[in-house]
């Protein structure tokens, strides 16, 4: 079936993202990010997080953290030992689909508070009982937990423990929460159940990743950037306070100015929503048009795990429906079976983890890939040529995502001037794509080298390391900072 491979190669070429386009992307990212630092309501949100220092590994204490941002809700308690190590106890629960997309915010937050209650009863019952014996006693502080709330959606923050939801992403859609303070929503659900918990900090997962990396591997200068390449994508970095000029116009904003810095949550998933420089294939356009938030998160829709599987599914389906190609169609020479209930025919029916499995199988007859195609799509008896065609597309889609990922990284590095200093620049990353898609970081590095103000020398200065548990340890660290800062505490109590 040479026509099949030719067509796969032709589609793959549409996903090429060459060096000159990477460069244009970087230049435009720098423009949009400067605009975001100066004004509110821009494409690239550049959200001030009110976190004004990164940890150095000596932080100590017991904190709670919860994480809402993907398909699971996680509750954990973190004991920071103060010597770059920690212990973490956690529980994870899948969020019922109806709470993610059709219920009310009250239903969702009460569900979250109930999970916190169950966790406390199992793992910290002594605090819980002590609190119940003296409910409402403000002096009973030793049994109160400070909680870091990792909430990985775009939020307009006004302080370290308050922020209003700008919009939902990643398949969540609970309209009555938009515009409301998500910390207050969680705190009132917690109070309704009389739990000994104070929501001390609001944390984006990228900020948590940055903090966790800085705590566990403190170098001479601390970590500069935290990024997620998982279900969604985003990054947070340390910015000079005087460059965040919009802070002066944000009424009610309170923060510590002593370090002269603040962590910015870029929300780069919405970089270039108006598509001035992002590449677009017919599959990208159709995916967006059929999504529940057309026209937004356009960068994320080309890069992150929520979407790559769907891009591949659309490309495979188009080839399958082309009678000249015979992909996944039985014939005299092929006994391939693609049943009607295959995910191939259903929106979101192809999980991005399939791309990592396919890309990883380099064996001549691709046995593991064939098993994965059956497990994920119920497609059986694939020929080697069909496998090759799928592989060509997977490679093209995954590589484009990785090269696109280099755009915000290069832009932020250039903007910060960090590559001009002697020190290594430390970047903490997390998420299923960097962790499991083969050579994702290698393709990122290749694209970084091609950017004029980064080059080989600059790329060598960047140390990229996986930083697990940002949403647990990172959130605990921010809760610690927040709970120590009495000025913030009294401001939030007013
Ligand atoms: C959200 C970000 C988050 C990222 C990674 C995006 O969809 O808007 O806030 O950091 O996903 O989880």
Image: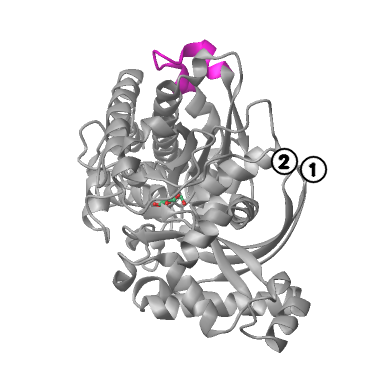
Q: Specify the segment rendered in magenta.
A: 446-460
Magenta stretch containing residue 449, yes or no?
Answer: yes
Residue 378 visible here: no
Above or below: residue 301 compared with residue 347: above
Give coordinates of residue 25: x percent, y percent: 31, 27
Say whether residue 224 is left or right of residue 453: right
Q: Which residue sits at x=53%, y=11%?
A: 457
Give the quarter of the image for residue 3: top left
Pointers 1 and 2 in contact (CB under 8 A)? yes
User: Secondary structure under badge 1?
Assistant: loop
Residue 267, horizontal then vertical, whole percent? 38, 45
Q: Which residue is mark 1?
A: 83
Residue 94 spot, x, y in % from top left: 54, 70
Query: Magenta span: helix, strand or loop, mainly?
Result: helix
In this rendering, the answer to whether 205 lies above or below 31 is: below
The residue depicted at 66 percent of the width and 68 percent of the height is: 145
Considering only vertical position in the picture, is 407 above or below 49? above
Return the residue at label 2: 57
106, 59: nearer the viewer: 59
Q: CA distance from mark 1 to mark 2?
A: 6 Å
Question: Residue at point 76% right, 51% down?
Answer: 86
Viewer-closest of 286 and 274: 274
The C terminus: image quadrant: bottom left
Q: Which mark is residue 380?
A: none
């Amino acid at each position: 079936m040479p026509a099949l491979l030719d067509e796969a190669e032709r589609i793959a070429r549409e996903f090429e993202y060459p060096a000159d386009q990477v460069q244009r992307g970087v230049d435009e990212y720098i423009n949009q990010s400067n605009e975001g630092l100066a004004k509110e309501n821009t494409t690239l949100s550049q959200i001030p997080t009110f976190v004004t220092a990164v940890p150095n590994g000596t932080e100590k204490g017991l904190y709670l953290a919860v994480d809402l941002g993907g398909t699971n809700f996680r509750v954990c308690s973190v004991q920071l030992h103060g010597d770059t190590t920690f212990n973490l106890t956690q529980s994870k629960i899948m969020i019922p689909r109806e709470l993610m997309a059709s219920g009310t915010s009250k239903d969702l937050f009460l569900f979250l508070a109930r999970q916190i209650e169950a966790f406390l009863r199992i793992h910290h019952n002594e605090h819980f009982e002590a609190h119940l014996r003296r409910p409402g006693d403000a002096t009973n502080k030793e049994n109160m937990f400070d909680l870091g709330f990792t909430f990985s959606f775009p939020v307009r923050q006004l302080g370290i423990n308050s922020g209003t939801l700008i919009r939902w992403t990643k398949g969540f859609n609970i309209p009555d929460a938009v515009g409301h303070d998500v910390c207050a929503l969680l705190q009132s659900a917690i109070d309704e159940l009389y739990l000994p918990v104070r929501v001390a900090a609001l944390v984006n997962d990228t900020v948590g990743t940055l903090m966790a990396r800085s705590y566990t591997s403190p170098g001479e200068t601390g970590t500069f950037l935290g990024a997620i390449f998982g279900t969604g994508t985003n990054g947070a970095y340390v910015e000079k306070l005087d460059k965040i000029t919009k802070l002066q116009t944000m009424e009610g904003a309170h923060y510590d100015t002593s370090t002269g810095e603040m962590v910015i949550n870029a929300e780069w998933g919405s970089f270039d929503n108006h598509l001035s420089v992002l590449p677009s294939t017919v599959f990208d356009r159709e995916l967006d048009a059929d999504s529940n938030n057309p026209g937004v998160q356009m960068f994320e829709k080309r890069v992150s795990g929520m979407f790559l599987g769907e891009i591949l599914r659309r490309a495979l389906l188009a080839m399958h429906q082309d009678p000249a190609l015979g992909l996944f169609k039985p014939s005299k020479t092929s006994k391939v079976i693609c049943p009607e209930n295959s995910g191939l025919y259903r929106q979101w029916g192809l999980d991005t983890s399939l791309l990592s499995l396919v890309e990883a199988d380099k064996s001549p007859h691709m046995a593991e890939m064939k098993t994965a195609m059956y497990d994920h799509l119920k497609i059986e008896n694939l020929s080697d040529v069909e496998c090759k065609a799928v592989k060509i597309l997977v490679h093209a889609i995954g590589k484009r995502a990785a090269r696109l990922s280099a755009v915000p990284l290069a832009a932020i590095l250039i903007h910060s001037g960090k590559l001009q200093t002697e020190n290594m620049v430390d970047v903490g990353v997390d998420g299923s794509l960097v962790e499991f898609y083969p050579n994702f970081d290698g393709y990122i590095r290749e694209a970084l080298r091609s950017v004029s103000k980064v080059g080989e020398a600059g790329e060598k200065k960047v140390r990229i390391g996986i930083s697990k548990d940002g949403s647990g340890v990172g959130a605990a660290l921010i809760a610690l900072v927040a709970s120590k800062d009495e000025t913030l505490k009294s401001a939030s109590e007013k």
